[in-house]
Image (cartoon, rainbow, N blue to C red):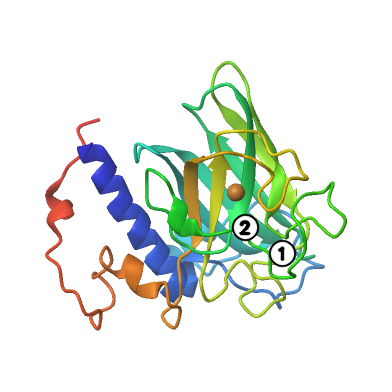
Amino acid sequence: MKNFKKLVTLTSAGLLLSAFNPSTMTIFAEESSDSVETTESVETTEGAESEATTEESAESTEEYAFEVETDVINSDEEVIGTATFREDQEGLVTVELELEGLEEGEFGMHIHEVGLATAPTFEDAGSHFNPTDVEHGTDSETGPHAGDLPNLMVGEDGTVSETIEIPDVTLDPEGENTLNSTDGTTLIIHTEADDYETQPTGDAGDRQAAAVIFAPLEDSEFYEAESDQSSDEESSIDSEEAPEESSEESSE
Ligand SMILES: [Cu+2]
């Protein structure tokens, strides 16, 4: 469990960064898309190594307008992998899932409407992300929700390695149906399959894993709920808790 605490701390720090520091999110939506197709290398100036922020995003900056990598956490608060959300220059949003340690099976998966995910229930992630106020599921009359995703298929080995398209959303904070909304958003993996029609959740059972995509912004009613873990960057946060987790070192 010590490992977990540390990981959670790291996660929330990362979320803070993505919420307040655009450098982790690789924004350059207006860059020319005609001349930059190769992922070979970025044309940085000589000696650009000193620019710390280029290291992580160098490969993706030309291909993607936005990129957000998040840890996926199970109900025991263990990190079981990553979910990397990307938006290309044409506006297509995808999520690449690299997961392990799951049970074999078919599980409902959605984006939920609050950027909070407290184990073991993850109930604070709220309902499905549904900015257009339609019915749930591809088999409903008006659906699906923008946050509805195909069921996650997990094989015997408990791993998942796949990329899924998310057609009706954007990662652009200014865009329509943006996942980078005031209240944030969270990816949820359920314990049962989504039947794609039962309202409002597809009868997908409980929540077994989650990944906060975007944390709530400062003017969200949910903002405070996550501020207890994040006092490293924002000095104005009311609760100034000592960072006790920071002394926990992983031995694995
Ligand atoms: Cu869900």
Amino acid type assigned to the residue bearing label 1 in the image: Val
Q: Crowding at label 1, few (<14), some or many (≥20) Cα neighbours within 10 Å?
A: many
Q: Residue at x 66, y 34 (%)?
A: 193
Q: Residue under circle 1?
A: 169
Relative placement, left or right, of 245 versus 13 is: left
Task: Residue type at mark 2: give it.
Answer: His
Q: Secondary structure at mark 2?
A: loop
Q: Earlier in the sequence, mark 1 or mark 2?
A: 2
Task: Residue lying at the far front in this picture: please name it.
Answer: 199
Viewed as shown, does residue 72 lie left or right of 39? left
Percent from the top left, x then y, of residue 248? 15, 45
The answer to whether one can see residue 16 in this image is yes
Among the 4 quarters of the image, the one containing residue 75: top left
The residue tagged 2 is 128
User: Mark 1 and 2 residues: CB-CB less than 8 Å, in contact?
Assistant: no
Disc 2 crowd rating (10 Å Cα; few below 14, some 14-19, many 20+) is: many
Distance from mark 2 CB to nearest ligand 1 atom below 8 Å: yes
Ligand 1 closer than 8 Å to label 1 CB: no
Quarter of the image holding residue 156? top right
Q: Secondary structure at mark 1?
A: loop
Q: Position of residue 61 (x, y in %)?
A: 61, 63
Q: Determine the residue located farthest toward the right in the rendered image.
A: 141
**Residue at x-position 68% and y-position 74%:** 29
Compared with 1, 94 (above or below) is below
Coordinates of residue 208 in the picture (x, y in percent): 48, 38
- Residue nearest the observer in this picture, 185 or 132: 132
Identify the residue at image location x=28%, y=41%: 4
- In this orientation, does residue 51 appear? no
